[in-house]
Amino acid sequence: MTPSILFQEIHQQPGVIADLLSTEAQNVAKIVQSIRGKFSYVVIAARGTSDNAARYAQYLFGVHNHLQVALATPSLYTLYDSPPNLDGALVVGISQSGQSPDIVAVLAEGKRQGRPTLAITNQTQSPLALSADFVIPLHAGAEKAIAATKTYTTSLAALAMLSTSLLPESQHLAQLHGIPQVMQTTLDNLAEVIGRAERYRYMGHCAVIGRGFNYATAFEIALKVKELTRVVAEPYSSADFRHGPIATVIQGFPLILVAPTGAVSNDILDLAAHLKRLQAEMILISDDEQLLAGARLGLPIPSGLPEWVTPLVSVLPGQLFALNLALACGLNPDQPEGLHKVTETL
């Protein structure tokens, strides 16, 4: 049987990430040279999957560059016609299509206020790209499946290139360039276990939990599960989950935990132990053998990765889980009902 388009695009990600890293290195270096010293914080406008990439940027630029990252409120620029003062901001728009008028409006206002503007997009002739001072093309190729996969991970990689290039000197660039091979290894290793996602074909709801750099990953996996399977998947940080939502956990409640080794590991380990006592049904994405062994379904990623690059890898098991669950439910993963590839909002 011919693999779905989505399956093919998920497996294209190591290649397109490698292409982006090699093709855009000089462009990103020039952008950094032009904007260095001209901003004190970052405002990012995005929707959907791109908004999840922006959540990654909040931790990435915060930890590595000591920069505050704010998520724009596009309705202020369009529906309310009351844009905020962007003094000191680098204004960034992230959109795979570059078509949504509200995202374009944020960059247009940034330019009107004399702020540097940057577009991260897969379409270099889109309204977003044409409105920006600078563009980082994603080089993802045509993304034909409705659910975004390779434009998500290339957006993460583009942000990682920008953050790394802003540093005076760093080993981070070498760590980033090693990621395509790690992604390929992850996909190869998952082939043996991902079919077990069929167990959850009658699942009606679940929670997806991550924290720190992988807070964004929890949101992106929850979005893929919702888009592809119609399951109500709610994303949380492990901290927020304790503040009320944990009351929903009963025996058999399905939970996806995104738990690569890093600064938040002890918090996730503690939560996992508590959830086990509550007899939750745990699906674990981790490099920690102890965590994986205690899960109903363990989805492994390679060990030894710096935490800041793990979102490029830890999202892959979630993408494949959502794809395989959709197939088990008899749904078309390439054309989820009620969705369109390009969504334009005001």
Image (cartoon, rainbow, N blue to C red):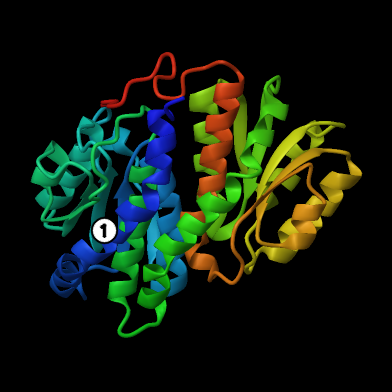
Task: Depth check: give the residue in front, 345 or 207.
Answer: 207
Considering every residue shown, the one lying at the far right of the view is 277
Q: Residue at x 80, y 54 (%)?
A: 293
Asked if residue 85 can be seen in this view, the reply is: no
Task: Depth check: give the residue in front, 262 or 289.
Answer: 289
Across the whole image, how many numbered discs are drawn on residues? 1
Eyeballing the image, is 283 above or below 165? above
Task: Depth check: give the residue in front, 232 or 102.
Answer: 232
Could you tell me residue 261's position as x and y percent?
64, 66
**In this figure, which residue is indicated by the disc labeled 1?**
19
Q: In the visual, does 271 lie left or right of 227?
A: right
Eyeballing the image, is 219 above or below 211? above
Residue type at mark 1? Asp
Could you tell me residue 229's position as x and y percent?
55, 23
The quarter holding residue 145 reads top left
Considering every residue shown, the one lying at the far front of the view is 1
Q: In the visual, does 146 lie left or right of 22?
A: right
Q: Residue at x 54, y 55 (%)?
A: 186
Image quadrant holding the C terminus, namely top left
